[in-house]
Image: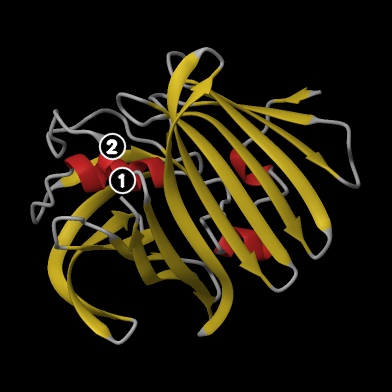
Amino acid sequence: MIKNLTFHVISYFSSFRQCCFLFGIGIWSLVILSSLSPAFAQDASYDQYIGEMVRYDVRSLAMKMADAHIELKGKVDLDGRKAYLITFEAKGANFYDREKIYADIKDLYPLRIERDVNYLGSIEKITEVYDQDKFVVTVTKTTKAKPQPEMIILKKKARIDNLYCFIYRYRLMGSFRLGSSLELNLPTKDVSVKIVKNTKIKIADRMYNAFLLETTPAQYRLWFDTSQERVLLRIDKSAMVGGTSMIMTKYEKTR
């Protein structure tokens, strides 16, 4: 059954899953980048992130809610075309969220996302299929209680991005120039992302020099390491009560 619904009525954008953005911790981590702006360079390869895993604590109201990690697994076949596979996984008490994000080889825009969520025994399977030429994403959700698929179609004005894809893309090609900004069109609202300052941040008993990015209207705050790796150190998502932070605990590189 196809329902032309606004984004905010999707039931799985609720409670703990929403605050854990991971954002959803997955929610589904959608961000929309209208175009490759001058903030991005042109010639680079995402292969350098293969074999890298970044681990995080997910916290809300000063309490740890989950362990999470994100990894670019490598190149895979997706419906006859090559794609990068990014995985995100979060585990907490009575909570599990895993995302498999298939992204375009050239520009890392999402092609397909598969999510498995188990929250207090409520099991959901969510699939997002992107038509980037038409600026459309089709979301199909099934639950243990309601196995009949529910389909929602979202139409945007530009190509649709994913938060994790955006993070990798900005790490690779962002200018990291103070004052530079990007216009982002999220499913819930339009925002701009701007580098507001160079700062210091304490992560796991270590001080890092970092670039701080903020969105307008206020939605996310992101801290990237100033080293060559440009690792995402922390990301905050605002909420009416408490908000949520994902804070790096460990960076691993196997190749």
Q: Position of residue 234 (x, y in %)?
A: 35, 67
* Element at label 2: helix
Whether the residues at callouts 2 and 1 have beta carbons within 8 Å, the answer is yes
**Please, is residue 125 above or below residue 220 in the view?**
above
Q: Quadrant of residue 118?
A: bottom right
Name the spot of residue 55 as percent of width and height, x first: 44, 65
Point 31% across, 30% down: residue: 34
Task: Report the residue marked by disc 1.
Answer: 49
| Residue nearest the observer in this picture, 102 or 240 | 102
Instruction: Judge from the rendering whether residue 174 lies leftward or rightward of residue 125; answer left or right.
Output: left
- Say which quarter of the image contains residue 64: bottom right
Mark 2 Cα-neighbour bin, 10 Å: few <14, some 14–19, many ≥20: some
Return the x and y of residue 37 as percentages of the image width and height: 18, 32
> What residue do we see at 26% from left, 42% from top?
48
- Give the residue type that dot 1 points to: Tyr
Toward which corner of the image does residue 142 lie, by quadrant?
top right
Question: Which residue: 52% across, 12% down?
Answer: 80
Residue 96 in view:
yes
Q: Amino acid at mark 2?
A: Tyr
- Which residue occupies the foreground of this view, 241 or 48? 48
Callout 1 secondary element: helix
Kindly identify which residue carries mark 2.
Answer: 46
Looking at the picture, does residue 165 appear above or below residue 152?
Answer: below
Residue nearest the observer in this picture, 212 or 56: 56
Whether residue 162 is visible here, answered yes or no, is no
* Residue 119, placed above or below residue 45: below
Position of the N terminus, as image quadrant, is top right
